[in-house]
Amino acid sequence: MARSPFPLSPGVAKPEKIATVLEKEIRSGVLGFGDRLQSENELVQRFSVSRNTVRKGLEELSNRGLITTRVGIGSFVTFDGKRVDDSIGWSRALANAGANAETRTLRLEVIEDAELAAKLGINNPAFIAVDRVRSNAADGHAISIERSRMPLSPELEEVPLKGLREGSLHQTLRSAGLVPDHGEEWVDIEMLSGEDAAVLNCPPGTPFLRGRRLTRAADGRPIEYVVSLLNPQHFALHLEF
């Protein structure tokens, strides 16, 4: 694909300039989700810079959440750089972000978890467990697996029998009057267990982002505790402060 020459603007660091040019191509659709970027050698020639400068530019692009780099293979575009806002529900958020995501429910039942109840500071150990896996509908590529736990309450007692409203946990909670007001989230790295790897169709030991999120109602009542394993080829953590 032919591209215009690379002008170096005074006062702008070369790696940042490279990242900005490639970002424009990604956001404009010239480079779409899953597309492979030019090789380092091709980028060196295109931008007339050193290999180290190209690598710093790609690192900056990765920090912006726009690409992922696989050692020995190359750099690939991830989700068109669009923000995934899971506060509106994962299915809708991924669809808005341009991901052709397919959701499969692995589990929807009532369980008892005394340890989690103690962690959340509640007396009743009964929870509604909803486990779901998401993958790319086109090629089955793993996106995420989420394990949600909601304290069993009168508002939700029919969920195990009737299922999720419109297939959405977000809609189910809101229709029951359980509206998240605040919460907290922890993010770290987890190597996939053999069981999770089989579900996600990935090799055991593959590193995934692990998010643990607790949401509460305005009165402090726990609404949902969810543990998500997120494919780092599609997700990155971006904090603003």
Image (cartoon, grey):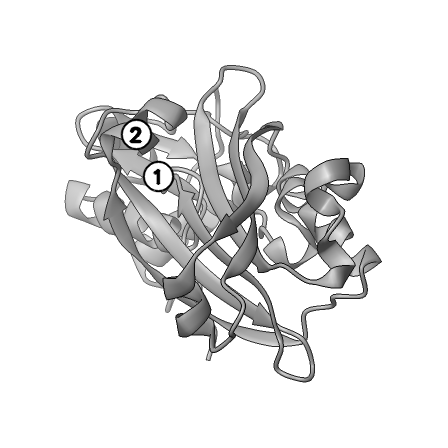
| Location of residue 224 by image quarter | bottom right
Q: As drawn, is 194 to the left or to the right of 34?
A: left
Neighbours of disc 2 within 10 Å: few (<14), some (14-19), many (20+): few
Q: Amino acid at mark 2?
A: Glu
Front-most of residues 235 and 209: 209
Give the x, y percent position of residue 228: 44, 48
Q: Is residue 169 visible?
A: yes
Q: Which residue is mark 1?
A: 68
Neighbours of disc 1 within 10 Å: few (<14), some (14-19), many (20+): many
Q: Is residue 9 visible?
A: no
Give the x, y percent position of residue 166: 80, 38
Q: Is residue 147 above or below residue 241?
A: above
Residue at image position (62%, 27%) is 100
Q: Which mark is residue 112?
A: none
Q: Is residue 192 above or below residue 20?
A: above
Badge count: 2
Alpha carbon separation for disc pair 1 and 2:
25 Å
Residue at image position (58%, 47%) is 82
Front-most of residues 1 and 121: 121
Q: Which residue is mark 2?
A: 195
Q: Amino acid at mark 1?
A: Thr
